[in-house]
């Protein structure tokens, strides 16, 4: 017997417009504009059905309810989904501390998967923290936790800080 087919449809906005605004605003203002719906949510968040929390200087949260479309072949949330939400929390937490004209990119990502994740877990939240930030390199970390306080994954990341000349934009 063939398994039942499932279908998921979603839309997103052109990310080029958001990228331009990212250089014009401080990281905190940019992330606040996304959280307020003034700037489009990045397509990856729409693809994976991840929600953005309210940013604060030095912190932002991302959350999701595990769904079937997150599953790997053995019926658990794929490690790439968990890595994506943790990378988002770490990078955006760093971005919230950066001035206008400054961005970042992940150079290295390390994830420890501590517990299996499935639909049964309910809402999971990734919270980032900047450990150290210099003029070119930053070290960040994040945890993925459940409503019960259990830690499902922990990650660290090295990020490259990129300064752009706004007069050339």
Image: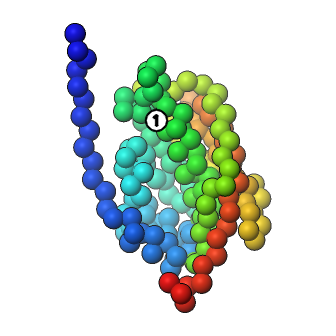
Q: Residue 163 placed where, x, y %?
A: 64, 76
Total marks in image: 1
User: As drawn, is 6 to the left or to the right of 135?
Assistant: left
In the rendered image, the vertical position of residue 46 relative to residue 76, given as above or below: below
Badge 1 local density, few (<14 within 10 Å), some, or many (20+)?
some
Residue in view at x 58 percent, y 45 percent: 86
Residue in the image at 22% along x and 20% along y: 4
Q: Which quadrant of the figure contains the N terminus?
A: top left
Q: Position of residue 153 (x, y in %)?
A: 62, 34
Residue at 58 percent across and 49 percent down: it is 87
To which residue does mark 1 refer? 123
Please indicate, yes or no, whether residue 93 appears anywhere in the rendered image: no
Query: Along the line of sight, which residue is nearer the eye, 118 or 162?
Result: 162
Return the x and y of residue 143 as percentages of the image width and height.
Answer: 63, 41
- Figure colour scheme: rainbow
Horizontal arrangement in the rendering, residue 15 relative to residue 139 (left or right): left
Estimate the x, y position of residue 136 in percent, counting from the top left: 73, 68
Q: Is residue 4 above or below residue 135?
A: above
Left/right of residue 112 with respect to residue 121 in the rendered view: right
Taking depth in this image into account, of 117 and 2 the one nearest to the observer is: 2
Q: Is residue 166 left or right of residue 133?
A: left
Can residue 127 be seen in this snapshot?
yes
**Which image quadrant is residue 130 in?**
bottom right
Secondary structure state at the residue bearing disc 1: loop
Q: Residue 41: which quarter of the image?
A: bottom left
The residue most toward the top is: 1
Question: In the picture shown, does residue 87 fall above or below 163?
Answer: above
Residue drawn at x 53%, y 45% is 84
């Amino acid at each position: 017997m063939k398994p039942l087919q499932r279908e998921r449809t979603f839309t997103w906005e052109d990310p080029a417009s958001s990228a331009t605004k990212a250089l014009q605003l401080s990281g905190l203002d940019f992330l606040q504009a996304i959280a307020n719906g003034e700037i489009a949510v990045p397509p990856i968040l729409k693809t994976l059905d991840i929600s953005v929390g309210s940013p604060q200087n030095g912190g932002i949260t991302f959350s999701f309810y595990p769904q079937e479309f997150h599953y790997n072949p053995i019926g658990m949330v794929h490690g790439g989904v968990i890595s994506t939400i943790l990378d988002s929390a770490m990078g955006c937490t760093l971005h919230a501390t950066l001035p206008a004209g400054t961005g970042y990119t992940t150079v290295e990502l390390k994830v420890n998967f501590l517990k299996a994740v499935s639909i049964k877990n309910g809402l999971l939240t990734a919270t980032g923290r900047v450990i150290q930030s210099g003029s070119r390199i930053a070290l960040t970390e994040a945890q993925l936790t459940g409503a019960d306080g259990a830690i499902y994954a922990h990650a660290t990341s090295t990020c490259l800080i990129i300064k752009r000349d706004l007069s050339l934009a």
